[in-house]
């Protein structure tokens, strides 16, 4: 079962007040195939089909016709309602935008978004490589209405035209988690946040490891360059051209070719009993490099 189906299962089992159920059902009907003669609601989710059937029967006193069709390995559940004009009035499904009483307060807006999610939404499992929640909507005016509601909660939703339909989507991981919390999918939120936090922690660890590896690579590259400078001076001239302090650093660099400057300073300090800092080693290596560059230029 997909992550989206799991969420819809959870939402289908939530209890709501009558007014909240009306707002939820309004979004469900609006998002289904409907005209003056009938409403056709179809879904592959058995739990959702039973939930919508119960809402219609309990809230609107309507018993829809139920058709079950098998499509390959899946079942399609179809609810059909004839002569729906009174239903439209009761649920505020008039034109492209629902009546004001359907989304009159915060609780009703949440219920409306819940119904919209049940019929039109899909959300990526957080285990996948990207975070994405979208609503597949047929009308631009209605899509803009949904964006207005979503963004009143700070979800930063956006609109994209896809062929002859419109996609309202949310991309930010934290916003998607907040949306699931808003519509009451708390089990899904726990799963989503656990995976998101794990992935974010893993990505941060990988970035730190990559940064550390880059520093190691840079340190090795720098050490190799220093060894070449010292060997050049030794071959073309003599280490006697260096001061005593510089010659000590050069000899220890040849002895410990892969040591970092910090490690080299600690080794020299320990073995010669003459303390030297990483900065001191770096300063002397700079002088060695300048001498090597002079020899190369000649």
Image: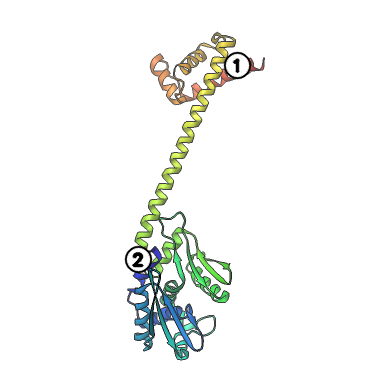
What whole-number distance in Å separates the C-alpha atoms at marks 2 and 1? Answer: 68 Å
Q: Residues within 10 Å of mark 1 (few under 14, many from 20)?
A: some
Residue bearing the label numbered 1: 291
Q: Residue at x 46, y 72 (%)?
A: 120
Q: Where does the C terminus fall, quadrant-wise?
A: top right
Q: Return the x and y of residue 23 as percentages of the image width and height.
A: 42, 80
Question: In this orientation, which residue lies closer to the viewer: 119 or 216?
Answer: 119
Residue toward you, 201 or 119: 119
Q: Residue furthest front?
A: 72
Snapshot colouring: rainbow
Tag of residue 186: 2
Q: What quarter of the picture does the N terminus occupy?
A: bottom left
**Is residue 276 left or right of 159 when viewed as pictured?**
left
Residue 104 seen in this snapshot: no
Task: Say if 90 sits above or below 68 in the image.
Answer: below
At which x and y percent is residue 80? 42, 84
Residue 61 screen position, x and y as percent: 36, 89
Q: Residue at x 39, y 63 (%)?
A: 3
Q: Is residue 130 visible?
A: yes
């Amino acid at each position: 079962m997909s992550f989206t189906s799991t969420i819809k299962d959870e939402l289908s089992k939530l209890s709501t007040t009558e007014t909240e159920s009306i707002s939820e059902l309004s979004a469900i009907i609006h998002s289904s195939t409907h005209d003056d003669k009938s409403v056709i609601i179809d879904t592959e989710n058995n739990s959702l089909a039973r939930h919508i059937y119960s809402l219609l029967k309990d809230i609107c006193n309507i018993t829809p016709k139920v058709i079950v069709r098998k499509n390959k390995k899946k079942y399609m559940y179809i609810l059909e309602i004839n002569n729906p004009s009174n239903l439209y009035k009761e649920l505020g499904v008039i034109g492209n935008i629902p009546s004001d009483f359907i989304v009159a307060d915060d609780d009703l807006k949440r219920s409306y978004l819940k119904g919209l999610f049940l019929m039109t939404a899909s959300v990526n499992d957080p285990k996948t490589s990207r975070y994405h929640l979208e609503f597949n909507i047929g009308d631009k005016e209605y899509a803009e209405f949904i964006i207005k509601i979503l963004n009143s909660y700070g979800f930063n939703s956006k609109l994209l035209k896809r062929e002859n339909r419109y996609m309202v989507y949310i991309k930010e991981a934290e916003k998607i988690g907040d949306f699931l919390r808003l519509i009451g999918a708390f089990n899904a939120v726990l799963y989503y946040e656990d995976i998101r936090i794990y992935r974010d922690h893993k990505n941060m660890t990988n970035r730190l490891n990559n940064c550390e590896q880059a520093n190691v690579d840079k340190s090795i590259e720098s050490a190799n360059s220093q060894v070449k400078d010292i060997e050049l001076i030794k071959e073309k001239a003599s280490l006697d051209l260096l001061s005593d302090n510089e010659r000590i650093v050069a000899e220890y660099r040849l002895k410990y070719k892969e040591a970092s400057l910090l490690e080299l300073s600690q080794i020299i300090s320990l073995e010669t009993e003459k303390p030297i800092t990483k900065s001191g080693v770096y300063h002397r290596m700079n002088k060695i490099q300048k001498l090597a560059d002079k020899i190369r230029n000649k």
